[in-house]
Image: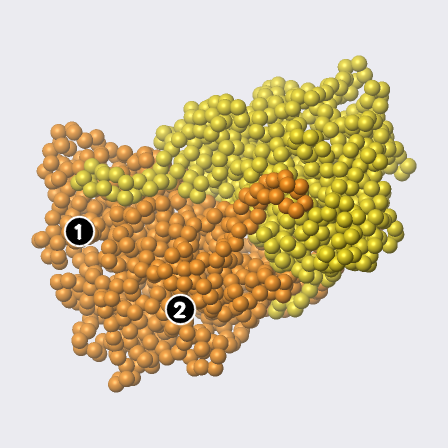
Chain colours: A orange, B yellow
Amino acid sequence: MKLYSSNLLWLLGAEALTGAVAAPSPKVPWARQMQKAAAHSRRMLNAAITKRQATNETIESCDISPAQEIDAPKANVWGGLTQTEAVSIVEWLFGQPELNLTTTEEATAWDNTLLIVELMQPNKSDALAYIDGNSCAPTRYAHAILNFQNSSEPYYQDILVGPLPVRNGTTRWEPLDYFLTRKTEGKVRNLDADADTLYGEWHYSVGASIADITLDLWNATMMGLDNDTLIAWGTDPVLQDPETGRVQRWDSFFSVQDDIFDVGSILPMGLYFLTEIRGRNVEDWSLDGWYYDGQFFATTEEFREAYWAGDVRKYDGNWDNEAFHTDQSGPIPPMDGNAPPVSVAPHGARFAVDEERQYVEWMDWSFYIGFSRDTGLALYDIRLKGERIIYELGLQEAIAHYAGSDPVQSHIAYLDSFYGFGPFNFQLLPGFDCPSHAKFLNSSFYTSETTVTHINSICLFEAEADYLMMRHSSASYISATKNIYFSVRSVSTIGNYDYTFTYAFFMDGSMSVEVRASGYIQAAFYAHNEDYGFHIHDQLSGSMHDHVLNFKADIDVLGTANTIQMMDVVPHTTTYPWSNGRQVNTMRVNRTFIETEDEGKFNWSPSGQVFITNQEERNRFGELRSWRVAPGIGTSHLAVENSTAIGNAAHWATHDFYATVRKDTESRSAHPYNSQDVHDPPIDFSAFFDGESLNQTDIVLWLNLGMHHVPQTADLPNTVHLHAGSSIQFIPTNYFETGIQRETVNMIRINYDGTENGTEVETFGAHEDTCALQYEPQDVDLWGYRGDSVVRKFPFSPDEYYKTHPAD
Amino acid sequence: MKLYSSNLLWLLGAEALTGAVAAPSPKVPWARQMQKAAAHSRRMLNAAITKRQATNETIESCDISPAQEIDAPKANVWGGLTQTEAVSIVEWLFGQPELNLTTTEEATAWDNTLLIVELMQPNKSDALAYIDGNSCAPTRYAHAILNFQNSSEPYYQDILVGPLPVRNGTTRWEPLDYFLTRKTEGKVRNLDADADTLYGEWHYSVGASIADITLDLWNATMMGLDNDTLIAWGTDPVLQDPETGRVQRWDSFFSVQDDIFDVGSILPMGLYFLTEIRGRNVEDWSLDGWYYDGQFFATTEEFREAYWAGDVRKYDGNWDNEAFHTDQSGPIPPMDGNAPPVSVAPHGARFAVDEERQYVEWMDWSFYIGFSRDTGLALYDIRLKGERIIYELGLQEAIAHYAGSDPVQSHIAYLDSFYGFGPFNFQLLPGFDCPSHAKFLNSSFYTSETTVTHINSICLFEAEADYLMMRHSSASYISATKNIYFSVRSVSTIGNYDYTFTYAFFMDGSMSVEVRASGYIQAAFYAHNEDYGFHIHDQLSGSMHDHVLNFKADIDVLGTANTIQMMDVVPHTTTYPWSNGRQVNTMRVNRTFIETEDEGKFNWSPSGQVFITNQEERNRFGELRSWRVAPGIGTSHLAVENSTAIGNAAHWATHDFYATVRKDTESRSAHPYNSQDVHDPPIDFSAFFDGESLNQTDIVLWLNLGMHHVPQTADLPNTVHLHAGSSIQFIPTNYFETGIQRETVNMIRINYDGTENGTEVETFGAHEDTCALQYEPQDVDLWGYRGDSVVRKFPFSPDEYYKTHPAD
């Protein structure tokens, strides 16, 4: 779930970010990439949807349109800072002497740095006044996170900067904690300040102290040598004793990969050590024990003594090998060498995009795209036929909670927004991650004085489902309606795991959010781990873990005055007027309303339905116009109860479904630094539940996707998306008078009477122009793929867009 | 869920069958259809995958192959009777004087007829000896169902005829009940023998008796007049009193459709009458009451008196109207007139078919296709890499159990195999039901001296999923594997409902079975029905119902000695050697084996996994090589407990999952005539559970797909497949040493180092030939669609294949 290299905790520093996220030498400007791409345009996959001259009498061509350009009706008030804003804020913050900031590049572990600058999301009330009314756009403010490391007690701090644009005299900064449940001026302790020391000096000294054993066991060392083949990493969050306040961590030895494949997370060696971190001086830290072969040793001496006395079993470790590599391997299946079926877009894109404002229209849907470092892609002001259905829909946090017999797996419960979904939202692969005919957008965020732009990291595409929207056949006719849908997708690879996020929109007015996971599992050493996973390779256990991904759905059904209705299908025994006193065993529906937040958390019932409705809005048949929220492919919540590893940091993970009153002060269910103080985190989601009425009020849903993952041999080399997916659907219910799936012309009716001339075909005017598509399966140039980011470092002129470094 | 026309119960008669299932005048031979298709071949959709000459320097073409022809390794012993066999059996049976058979065409309600002739499925042990060994193919027998109506107590009888081929002297018939739990020589009473009388004489007389009221209410009658606009139909199964043996039925008035659209099931009028059927003489039948506006009236006189006294509210009825029609309606969404994306097959089919033996190979998968009147499509001997995974996978029965305040909805619980999935397995629509590049197969069955062949009623196709099989990206490379899968599909429309059945196969070795429902709902009259559905149109309630579809999965994991293992993810609190006495709140897996059939029925647990395994077969890491069975999109079982409507006829519907010891005597979970004697049905599934050991034995799973359906306005005009789907997956677990998804060449790896020339692309030899596809969206000829069957009636010469009538 995470980077497991020795620079694990450097991720928030710019060097690691530009090193790990972008390619090592990110000096190639986007402009040059584009030029190269243009030169290859004939061979680009997009050629498939480009107009060509008709060269054959039997084929006619017609205009193929790329995504239509459109002007968004309003500014995208969730879309992030402009380049100009970001640069001016950074300049201004560096000018505030009380902050004492050092650029990330020059900062030591004892310097204050600026981690993140992003747009402060506007309050919903302000945003609605703008997007629904005649008000001006909300005044813009920036949200920044500072890392105050110039202290024996380092801390992060959320601050608000504004109003924007920056003007000396009017612009101020202030501590920001109104959206936090903990009121400490936005300050959260920083347990990562000495990551360099930990992964360097400390680990090397530990490694050296038992080099005799690691050499004997594996002919390997972790001493800071060039030929080291061991590293260590471990518990995340670190152990935080709720009573004593002690901070400890268990680390595990891992071997290092020796090929390009990113196998680090499946090379555990089965040896673990416990460190107590006491303050910032490594002299005060202590090595408090070892764990190997099911035995705990309080000191290195005890361990050494037992080891050389032959009192522990010697296990081989896990080493990089071909079985862990993703390249084609094994017998190629018959006919697999031929090109498989593929989706093509004969008439090009059938949607419209405002690229600058990141605004999209497809059929009767429209929405704005937002993007943040912490949680990546989010959608705002999702409308159907001009009516808002969801104000905000986006990821809040993802946990991957492991369990195991060893102290590392047992304490790993990654809270991924700490690492951020934005920084790892890599360039998408056309023809693989998204169809070749997809439209690709960039995404940007600003961190450590650096604007990072991921090229082509969001895709938009239509596809035809492999089943119809609706059909019916009788003795005299058949009618069938195609199921064409639209998707918005991004993929974030957080260390070993790749999460594919897809928001899909359908012609019946429903939509869905889906997550699928792939990439490398994080595995455990197999010894004594039987109760926590399968034995999946020689020395490897597929370490069991729960994925839970929390999404905020600020749903607005015909306004913001909403109520939640539950409808259960239940067995029922009763008599009826017609049953002559006889009891009938049958079923019925039971309907209830959720009254308060006390009833606002629950799990999906297999026989229940959940609706968001506005009790003032009934259709002409008297039914409440509603939106149903329902699991699609399986969802799950955390199996662990009162987790020792996470304390109060993830109370959003304990149920499938939560509903709370929407408040500006409860805008996010989690904070990226919840991991830094798990028992008293900046946002404790459980504090949202204080019994307020959910009757006809603005309701926010917090919905969990996820799965219980017990990896098996088929998770090697990589987990397959097929069985690691989760989705939730939003379905209009009694909302329209009849199904709007009938509005599309992509349907057909054929009448037949069995006679030779009796067949009539009605096509409803669907794509009446005859078009031809010339598609070349190999006409793909993926040599332009960089997996790269455009990185522009401060100071630079925001007007010179393609200039990425001051020196360029 | 059913035909609701006045000839509801004629379905098993040939006239209704060829009338309702095939087109009214099925006299066009298949040959002529094929000739016509050939003449139009240039414009056929298949042209899209036909080799074309290269006409453009930038495009090269290469061979496009249709489905490769292949010879099945063995005969298809499940594939049905040959024409010759069927005809000879019919001839032979008509020659047996004790049966006293009359051809269906000539039969009255008092004549004995032959309903069905089909292949008796071989016993598994015999089949395995043949397909796995050197034995000869099992001796073939036919299974026939006779309808003995020449009796005051008419009955159906299952008989066995054989051995085949028919030879006078050696061929015999005998009563067949060894696969029934009720041992009555295969005889089941026939409650349908007087359907003509019921829907004719009886209903017309009832309609005439209250014509004054129907005219006053709706200006409509049901009296057998040409201008009647009312019909009646009702409870199914009929009411069967378990104590007295009384047989009653409630019927509801419906208006009749006045356009081509098949809206009959959504036109209830809210008026119901109760009939007691006493024997076969209509003089002995009685009208036992009326129900209207929530009131029961014991006699017509009581009802009439109350009506004309103004003691009942007068409701308008439901009439055919445009809101119920499926044709395009409402504003066309923007850009919807352009052709949407579509799947194409640039290299043609990548699978192989033996059409005669209905045998298919795709990649490392192979299977045989079977087909039957009762349950339609089934797959046999499903193998992956030559190893059998599933011996038999197919539908057993489908129930649609309604509930409502009125006596008709309250007693409708259709058991669809009574009508049969085979007869309604219509021709598929290329480009809609299946991609235009699909391969289509025919299906046949033999009923009422008639061989019915549905042209192009099974399709085989590959498609690319809209998400990858697996992917991983890092700072230096990205790897991605396409998710290409293979589907086998058929669609059966049982009256108002269309069921799309899809068996899908994946490159990771998993497979799935999926059902989606569309078509017209069956609706209720809205008055007093609030607790049983939404009010969805002026006088219409979306009548709540449960769909449960039972599938048999005779799974064989490394042989037939199998065991079921359960693995649950559970919260766990414990101390560890390393935890210094501290309790850790975490989770673990609990594994148990199902010991006997007593534990063999359960519902899916959100935190549990179910494996079928062979305890003697462990992989080299010591784990059991297993196949996981898991719900995909939602499944469900029946909400009704101890249903009054169905008695003992559907005990297979009460749970999600059942496992029993496989026996030749327990080959099917339901019998198509279970509805005829619901309290003592021919197959009572609950009798399969008698505590036998499930430890290392041949296990059959009976798995339910389904959904709780509470129709809402968007179910008009037709239910959308999107939210009416259900699936189950079969997933290899610790079965292979690593994931076989790595064997495909349809993957890519791109290395990048951020420099301009640093990108390397590895394509693994995927489709290296450059091919071009010229695709024309409009190049489709659906004028050849007939919705037709090729029907050949007895007596005819089986050698003259295209001769469908003796007179032709």
* Disc 1 with disc 2 on a shared chain: yes
Where is residue A367 shown, x and y percent of the image?
A: 49, 68
- Residue B718, relative to residue A269: is it above or below? below
Q: Chain of mark 2?
A: A
Residue shown at the point (66%, 55%) measured from the top left: B527
* Quadrant where the C terminus of chain B is found in the figure: top right
Residue shown at the point (49%, 35%) measured from the top left: B602
**Badge 2 density bin: few <14, some 14–19, many ≥20, Cα 10 Å:** some
Q: Which of A125/A220 is in front?
A: A125
Q: Which of A590/A236 is in front?
A: A590
- Residue A528, relative to residue A737: is it above or below? above
Image-based side of B44 in relation to A63, left or right: right
Residue B448 visible in this rendered orientation of the protein? no
Q: In the rendering, which numbered label is found on residue A292? A: none
Callout 2: helix, strand or loop? helix
Callout 1: helix, strand or loop? loop
Disc 2 designates what residue? A30
What's the CA distance linking mark 1 and mark 2?
A: 52 Å
Residue shown at the point (85%, 42%) measured from the top left: B201
Residue B182 visible in this rendered orientation of the protein? yes
Q: Nearer the viewer, mark 1 or mark 2?
A: 1
Q: Residue furthest bottom?
A: A169
Residue shown at the point (32%, 34%) measured from the top left: A530
Q: Amino acid at mark 2?
A: Trp
Image-based side of B125 in relation to A660, left or right: right
Disc 1 designates what residue? A243
